[in-house]
Amino acid sequence: MSNVMNDNDVRMNAPTQRMHGILCELVEISTSKGSREVQADITGAYPVYVWNAKDSMKVTPAKARAALKRYVATARAGHSAGTDISDAHGRNLTLTYRVGGKNPRTTRLWAYALNTVYGADKRAAKAEARSAALVAAAANGGVWFAAGVNDKDGNPVQYADEQTARKAWVRQPSNYGANWWEDKNAKAAKLAEAVVSQGKPFNKAHSGKVMPKKAATPSVSKAQLVATCKALGLPHTGTIADLRARINSAL
């Protein structure tokens, strides 16, 4: 159920604030006599904020009214509380919605409903693109895997390219965690340390930990490779290339 509340009673996250701001601009333009630049793409079922002001669109009152009509239809069809949204655009801007979950708050209904649809469309497009990328990877040497990275059912997660697999390994809580990228000077070393393979998944029980982690080291030393070979019960003499080959064969 939606209500009409003062701004002081409303808390919007950043995406909802941006969406609400765009809607406010369009409502103003729709009743004005002149055009205005809006920092968004308003051509679809919902407005999409553009980060570069150079990509702003010149919006006439007629274009604003047509866009707002589409956005009303999108919100009505895309959210359970959308039936409260009417053709009175000014009123729509004041409607609120109570969001539950971990961060309960009262937010602006129209903007929130549009962002819900936008988010669902983004996730669907991302999943479709990922599926296509995996098919392409399978036909060109095989998909990639990161040691110790499995889905909720315990199956190794597939990746379309080596870099994405490396990032997945690094993000693991048992490795460097979600904030692994904050130390810019250590990013390359962490990614180089990642244990990944193409075409063949690792054993499900593989922890993903085979090399001692030294975030500030730009490459793995021979001493580290020797220690890894010893830990895996492998011969630990020879060149760096020999040691790497043995480790890769054993994983």
Image (cartoon, rainbow, N blue to C red):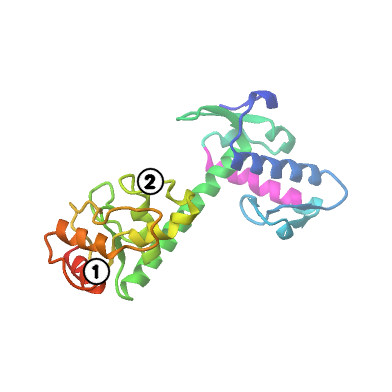
Look at mark 2 in the image and give the residue it sits on: 177
- Residue at (63% x, 27% y) in the render: 10
Dot 2 and dot 1 residues touching (CB under 8 Å): no
Judged from the image, the secondary structure of the residue bearing numbered disc 2 is loop
- Percent x, y for residue 55? 71, 60
Number of other residues with Cα within 10 Å of mark 1, as a class: few under 14, some 14 to 19, many 20 or more: some
Number of other residues with Cα within 10 Å of mark 2, as a class: few under 14, some 14 to 19, many 20 or more: few
- Percent x, y for residue 158? 31, 60
- Of 182 and 106, nearer the camera is 182
Quadrant of the rendering where the C terminus is positioned: bottom left
Quadrant of the rendering where the N terminus is positioned: top right
Q: Is residue 68 above or below residue 52?
A: above
The magenta-colored residue range is 64-79
Q: Is residue 18 above or below residue 187?
A: above
- Residue at (66% x, 36% y) in the render: 86
Look at mark 1 in the image and give the residue it sits on: 244
Q: Quick one: which residue is furthest to the right in this view? A: 33
- Of 113 and 185, nearer the camera is 185
- Residue at (75% x, 50% y) in the render: 64
Query: How much space separates mark 2 and mark 1, taking CA atoms?
Result: 25 Å
Judged from the image, the secondary structure of the residue bearing numbered disc 1 is helix
The kind of residue on which mark 2 rests is Gly
Q: Is residue 105 visible?
A: yes
